[in-house]
Image (cartoon, helix red, strand yellow):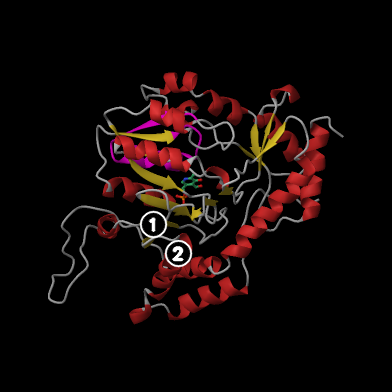
Amino acid sequence: MKRILVSGPWITQKEIDYVTDAVTNAWYENANIYHERFEKAFVECIGVKFAISLPSCLSAIHLSLLSLGIGPGDEVIVPDVTWIATSAPISYIGATPVFADIDEKTWCLSAESFEKLISPKTKAVIPVDLYGNIPDMETIRNIAQRYKIFIIEDAAEAIGSEYKGHKAGSFGDTGVFSFHGSKTLTTGEGGMLVTNKENIFHRCLFLRDHGRKARKPGDKMFWNTEVAYKYKMSSMQAALGLAQLERIDELVERKRQIFNWYQSELGNIQGITLNYEAPNTKNTYWMVTVVLDEKFGFKKEELISLMSEKNIDCRPFFYPLSSIPAYKDLKQVTQAQQRNKNAYKISSYGINLPCGMNMTKEKVNYICEALKSILGLS
Ligand SMILES: Cc1ncc(COP(=O)(O)O)c(C=O)c1O
């Protein structure tokens, strides 16, 4: 069996046609047509008022924090288990990330842990829709409202997911998405910021274009009123994103199909936990993930190297942020390490299995057989 990689996109003639058209025609007076179409379609898809296409989800989180007025001395609560892109922009703006535990079932931010960590310095929380799931958003929103804390919903991994009939990304003051090559919808690299608040929308537009206001006839050109950023997506990326977005239902269905193949092979095995889907949630399973019972005696790194010997590429469950060297100098990491029991337990025994868009049932069967034989189950 050829090496099976963990993730990758599904590109059709539609994407090739749109990108070809963008590189051929999206210049001069048409320079922005694909951005406009992509953002308009995105607004409709997520059910929000405004969307801004960006070069990455990281930049969307950075702009969210800046536009909400968060800065030095403030604290922002994030789940301990996520990709560092969720928390890195908190440091960029001189604020402090505070690491909360995750929920045992959803693997997303624990509402209880979030509430316990609120201090007078807490200005925002960034719940993460980990691996395509959605946390207990209703409770998180109620807590945030009670304490007057902003929400930035990190939906980088969750395009198309739903919670109580609403789309991932629509639950916060801002919502942010990633279109990295590994994601369900890709633009190669790219991101989107969505919001329902007009003032945040305009502030983000201003900040992502070197602190320039939209010009009216007669205004001076190159007249920057603040030192800001250059965060823009190219037309070719926007065209790719638009083509993918027009296929979003089929992309999401493919992800759910891949998960179902895994579930039928592994779902009934004692000691193997797959991604959870609450009754009121639609999980889009960006990463099919298994968490193994300690009784098997395998930590994730060992399992990944044994799977690799069988030509299967897996990824470790994200390490708790409070465990990685990047944050060793943060005062609160020792407390977080002791406090965040779920984060440490789940992360140690979790791996992401291959679930790129090119997966087939045969490949899934091969992977499940390999996993079972390593675990001594076949
Ligand atoms: C949870 C989460 N947040 C943020 C990001 C950052 O996305 P990007 O690489 O587009 O900046 C990622 C990317 O993988 C992610 O998984």
Circles 1 and 2 in contact, beta carbons < 8 Å: yes
Instruction: Tell me the residue at 19%/70% (across/down).
Output: 215
User: What's under tag 1, amino acid-wise?
Assistant: Val
Comparing 45 with 71, the one in front is 45
Q: Where is residue 309 in the image (x, y as percent from the top left)?
A: 76, 38
In this view of the protein, can residue 377 be seen by the observer? yes
Instruction: Tell me the residue at 62%/74% (across/down).
Output: 13
Label 1 SS: strand
How many C-alpha atoms fall within 10 Å of the one at disc 1: few (<14), some, or many (≥20)?
many
**Cβ of disc 2 within 8 Å of ligand 1?**
no
Counting every numbered tag in the picture gives 2
Question: CA gap, disc 1 to disc 2?
Answer: 9 Å
Answer with left or right where residue 233 lies relative to residue 187. left
Q: Where is residue 19 in the image (x, y as percent from the top left)?
A: 51, 73
In this view of the protein, can residue 100 be seen by the observer? no
Answer with left or right where residue 114 lies relative to residue 12. left
Circle 1 is placed at which residue position? 194
Query: Is the C terminus in the top left, top right, bottom left or bottom right quadrant?
Result: top right
Q: Which stretch appears magenta?
A: 79-101
User: What's under tag 2, amino acid-wise?
Assistant: Phe
Instruction: Tell me the residue at 54%/53% (across/down).
Output: 161
Circle 2 is placed at which residue position? 42
Comparing 169 with 233, the one in front is 169
Answer with left or right where residue 127 lies relative to residue 351. left
Q: Is residue 212 above or below residue 175?
A: below
Instruction: Tell me the residue at 55%/27% (across/down).
Output: 342
Q: Where is residue 188 in the image (x, y as percent from the top left)?
A: 52, 59
